[in-house]
Image (cartoon, coloured by chain):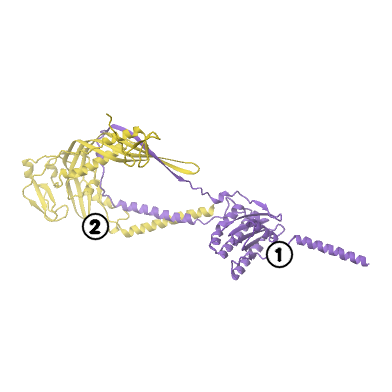
Chain colours: A purple, B yellow
Amino acid sequence: MKKKILSIIVALTVCLSCAFTAYAAEIPDSRLLPRLVDDADLLSDSEEGKLLATLDEISERQNCDVVVVTVDTIGDNTATEFADDFYDYNGYGAGKNRDGILLLISMADRDWAISTCGYGITAFTDAGQAYMVEQFKPALSDGDYYEAFDEYAALCDDFLTQAKNGKPYDNGNLPKEFPYVGLIICIGASIGVAFLVVNGMKNKLKSVRTKTDADAYVRQGSMRIAQNRDIFLYRTVNRTKRSTESNSGSSHSSGSSTHSSSSGTTHGGSSGKF
Amino acid sequence: MSSVQEFTCPCCAGAIEFDISSQKMKCPYCGTEFEMDSLKGYDECLKQDGQDEMNWQIPSGQWSEDEASGMRTYVCNSCGGEIMGDSTSAAADCPYCGNHVVMTNQFKGSLRPDYVIPFKLDKEAAKEALKKHLCGKRLLPKVFKNENHIDEIKGIYVPFWLFDADADAHIRYRATKLRRWSDSNYNYTETSFYTLERGGNIAFDNIPVDGSSKMADDLMESLEPFDTSQAVDFSTAYLAGYLADKYDVTAQESIGRANKRVKSSTEDAFRRTTNGYTSVTPEATTIRLSNGKAKYALYPVWILNTSWRGKKYTFAMNGQTGKFVGDLPLDKAAYKKWLIALSSAFGVISSALLLLLYYLL
């Protein structure tokens, strides 16, 4: 009987420990972190509270984690490795595919990295990420971190919504920017054209002009050409460097490129300096 | 004995030397290289530059005793204007300033006109032309049309010097050709410089120069052209009922104006014989006139003076062709209003189109 009880206890223990290991292959509770980790302390407490609330709201509504992480240093890792590992290790991601996106800021070398996973890879294409970074990087560079993260969160929300409509933002399908420049050109050109028209009206008032030629008094057929010689003298060649600037959007091929993190999880992402 | 020939650089005017390494003529100052043939041609061309010779024969027709006795001269004591008319036309007011004129008893010589173009259009036509002149001008102050009143309409024979000449021209133009291309790294602009030599003859007939200092030159030039084929030999009969201005700018004094116009037209005419160049500018023009002859003619002009808000506006109509000229006042408020209205209209339309495209695409 005693043996039987013991064996049951052993079996239970084994079962439990198995279950525990199985769960540990997921992530232990102690390692689960909130969607905002401000280790570099770039935000004030109230900003942290507001941003976290925003990230949580978006993540839960979209069913896809939107995460911001700031650190002082990433050690010897590349920003992408650090971001991927941080994502995997701390159990971010919604659902069995661990859907989510993480923005990492490291202050030591002013690195940024985006790591996407699961549905995040689909929603945030390479071109899409480049577009997002273009939007919030100026604020990052200026040190307006809250503003940058808030913009990032809003963009993620927009991108996820767009992806759920079946057509993620991608090359040739990026969010349209409001045509401020076009509007300014329109207004400038309008004033220019109006000026020309009105000056045309003004010129109608003037009909007295000095004549500087006598074209009307050339005797018909009187012109004879006796000398007619064109002499080439010399030539000069100027060269100017061609601007190699090409549209940044077109440098990305469509879709998302992916790689495997150290734990073997598939991630998408991009990185750079701010 | 060999003569040393020196060439000046067409690019910087420095003295050119033979460059051994390139086996070409090279300017040591600006570094430009030349073919020997180009330099020779250029040098020959430079030697042809010379002084203008623009001499004219001045008219010297005199009044006959009979004609002179039938003529009257009037002098305006206010502005000094001097007009003439035959004994039948009683001039009372000065056509320039509107003050009374005084008849001087004896008609003083001066020159007898060679030709006259008789009036073809009458006073009514001039009035109509003024009305038309005021139409369709949006920036003309509205009240101008109603408030202005024609002080006087006068038909005046305006003295003109007509210049005929055969011009023998030698013109050197500096011309450039541009060629652009690019490779993967650079955009290139190649400028080729040429000297173009053109020489030949061109003749001018009846270039008019206003011989009255009372008539603004630009106003008279704006009335051109007059059709000189309808000019007839002068006879005092044509003056009946009209006034004639007496020239007070001599032919000699008017020559400068004629020369300028001859020169500019000659340069233009020969420039039109060049083609394929990006730019052609005359560098040296030598014009020699032969058979240069000035004639004295009277051209018919209707003068309309009107005053508005203390300012005098003078209009003139070609009494032969009906061409009507005269500057009009500008309504500054209307100018601003139109500018703002059109700017806004164009701005709204173009912005709306832009936004439409933005939201549709």
Q: Quadrant of the C terminus of chain A?
A: bottom right
Return the chain for callout 1: A
Q: CA distance from mark 2 to mark 1?
A: 94 Å
* Residue A195 drawn at (x, y percent): 37, 54
Residue for point 52% across, 57% down: A178
Mark nearest the camera among 2 and 1 is 1
Reading the image, the residue beneath label 2 is: B148
* Residue B96 drawn at (x, y percent): 17, 53
Q: Quadrant of residue B202?
A: top left
Reading the image, the residue beneath label 1 is: A31
Q: Can you see residue B3?
A: yes
- In this view of the protein, which residue sits in the foreground, B52 or A191? B52
Q: Residues within 10 Å of mark 1 (few under 14, many from 20)?
A: few
Q: Quadrant of residue B328?
A: bottom left
Disc 2 element: loop
Residues behind callouts 2 and 1 on a single chain: no
